[in-house]
Image (tube, rainbow, N blue to C red):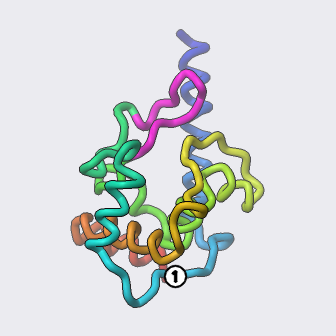
Amino acid sequence: MMKRLLIASAVVLGAAGAGLWLMGDADAPTMSMPDTVDIVRGQALYAENCAACHGANLEGQPDWRSPGPDGILPAPPHDETGHTWHHADALLFEYIKLGGEAALAQQGLEFASGMPGFGDQLSDAEIWNIIAYIKSTWPERQRAIQADKNR
């Protein structure tokens, strides 16, 4: 039981450490969302490319805070119950385009992530449309907090 608790604590602390980087602004990419995005197209692209893992209603996979047997965390929700709104647009873009491991590796962090990169399947504009759609579903409080991350 104690060994299991220590492993779980290490995983949570590791994820929290990655989360702190993800929330930080110092090393985040400097790109920003274009002035013009298509939320309706973003919703369709989300359904085609993201919903299989992150849920049709942005609800994520069950037990998304606990790593699976492979040590990888399940896909988190993108609604207000998840942590997506804790991160700046530039990081969300890089995570989608490059994939989780590659996006974090650019920052010198090793982190096992199940998130694949979509840069070969989606254009930059399509990625921004998906992000805009996800953000459009958040309550005002989460949108305001996330907007501060982009400043």
Quarter where residue 29 is shown: bottom right
Q: Amino acid at mark 1?
A: Ser
Q: Is residue 67 magenta?
A: yes
The number of callouts visible is 1
Is 84 situated left or right of 139 in this image? right
Q: Residue placed at 41% from the left, 45% from the top? A: 76
Q: Secondary structure at mark 1?
A: loop
Residue 11 or 135: which is nearer the viewer? 135
Quarter where residue 10 is shown: top right
Q: Residue 87: where, in percent of width, then height?
A: 48, 64
Is 118 situated left or right of 104 in this image? left
Residue 46 or 26: which is nearer the viewer? 46
Q: Residue 130: where, in percent of width, then height?
A: 39, 67
Q: Is residue 27 above or below residue 117?
A: below
Seen as rendered, the residue at the extreme bottom is 35
Residue 43 or 54: which is nearer the viewer? 43
Q: Residue 12: where, in percent of width, then height?
A: 54, 36
Residue 130 or 111: which is nearer the viewer? 130
Q: Residue placed at 37% from the left, 46% from the top? A: 54
Quarter where residue 108 is shown: bottom right
Q: Residue placed at 52% from the left, 82% from the top? A: 32
User: What's drawn in magenta, residue-wise?
Assistant: 64-76
Q: Is residue 24 magenta?
A: no
Q: Residue 86: where, in percent of width, then height?
A: 43, 62
Residue under circle 1? 32
Q: Is residue 136 above or below residue 5?
A: below
Seen as rendered, the residue at the extreme right is 108
Main SS of the magenta part reads loop
Q: Residue placed at 32% from the left, 55% from the top? A: 47
- Is the residue marked by circle 1 packed among few (<14), some (14-19), or many (20+) residues within 10 Å? some
Is 101 situated left or right of 73 in this image? right
